Image: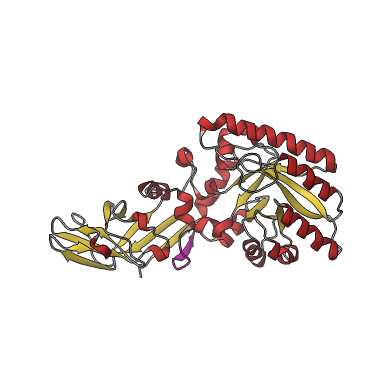
Amino acid sequence: MKKTVLEIDLKALEHNFNIISSKLNSKTKFMAIVKANGYGSNGTEVAKRLAAMGVDYFAVAFALEGIALRKSGIKTPILVLLPQVESIKEIVKYDLEPSLYSFYFLENFIDHLSSNEIRNYPCHLKINTGLNRVGFNEKEAKRAVNKIKNSDSIQLAGVYSHLAATDDLHQSKFTLSQINLFKKISSDVKSKLSCNPILHMSNTSAIYNYPECEFDMVRSGIGLYGYNNELNKELRPVHTLRSIIAQIINAKMGDSIGYNRAFICEEKTKVGVIPLGHADGISRLFSSNAYIIVNGKKAKVLGNICMDVFMVNLNGIDVHEGHEVVIFDRNNNAEDYAKSVGTISYEILTNLSERIERKIIG
């Protein structure tokens, strides 16, 4: 029986991992970003396949995501990028490696480790080199290193930073300044702590555009799922979102479609009702600005997206109720979809609701 389903192609995931890995030096480690349920796919299944392929590290945003991976049997090291003080006990319990990015978290984490007589717990120090999101700036990093040095609870497994604009070569001067600042700060950290942490800074577009930023490990998120702006031709989208035509309504000229009468038919219009809405992650911005693929043809969205459905124009398309439609796939991918509504593939993929059934293929 046909229905709404999000297909997750693990063969495409493997292909993308191999393509990105081929750009790296043989000794460079690979950190796979599987936060947000594997960018809206299935984080557990994605992680299992990548672990089987030999990925060196995983990264998640929050502790709960790392715990889910541990409970699924993942043994690979897991970095928690934005750990919260409230999750410290679980981080230690499930052997997750937290990012040390603020004094609030650092001091609370040291207190927990000390009170439980835990020594040399692996952590990653986050350096803010200009993204100004989270992390210690150069001056703060010196204070943070002193706190770590005065405690025997922490062992730095890694030192890392985030780049701000590696997909925009017009920003290369700024990107190079970030890289140089990271080199300076990380060198200072290593000298003060007499350790050899893994240095990592590159994201997917940096792997392609800034090989001098490779360091000891790279991080790839969106690239693993088949997207990286102009590099899409080499990568294969992992996600395919399919649905069906739940009903066909034959509207007359002058009839309105959907809430607020946002679309008025200028002719007789065959209207297809698709059982997906903003509760499923189909943005209201998709209203009247985009299209889906029906029987190989583009069917324009009509009127406002509803909570559970949206409508499309089926004029000139030979279809019936129950016919399968494609919201996005490899040929008409989520980046194309995103551009039609003025956003990016990240938002499209990670907004997909858990209400949509996931189907693993490949």
For the record, the magenta segment spans 353-362
Is 240 left, or right, of 274 in this rendering? right
**Residue 346 location, x and y as percent?**
49, 51
Q: Residue 318's quadrant in the figure?
A: bottom left
Marker count (numbered): 0
Q: Closer to the camera, 17 or 131?
A: 131
**Residue 228 location, x and y as percent?**
49, 42
Residue 10 sits above or below residue 194 on the image = below
Is 24 left, or right, of 228 in this rendering? right
Q: Which residue does the image show at 51% across and 52% down from the upper left?
A: 11
Is 170 left, or right, of 216 in this rendering? left
Is 243 left, or right, of 182 in this rendering? left
Q: Which residue does the image show at 42% across and 50% down from the upper left?
A: 334
**Residue 298 location, x and y as percent?**
27, 51
Identify the coloring: secondary structure
Q: Does 43 lie within the magenta span?
A: no
Q: Which residue does the image show at 42% across and 56% down from the upper left?
A: 240
Q: Does 356 lie within the magenta span?
A: yes
Q: Quadrant of the N terminus?
A: bottom left
Q: Closer to the camera, 46 or 220?
A: 220
Residue 337 sits above or below residue 72 on the image = above
Instruction: Name the residue furthest bottom.
Output: 1
**Residue 191 location, x and y as percent?**
83, 38
Q: Which residue does the image show at 70% across and 60% down from the upper left?
A: 75
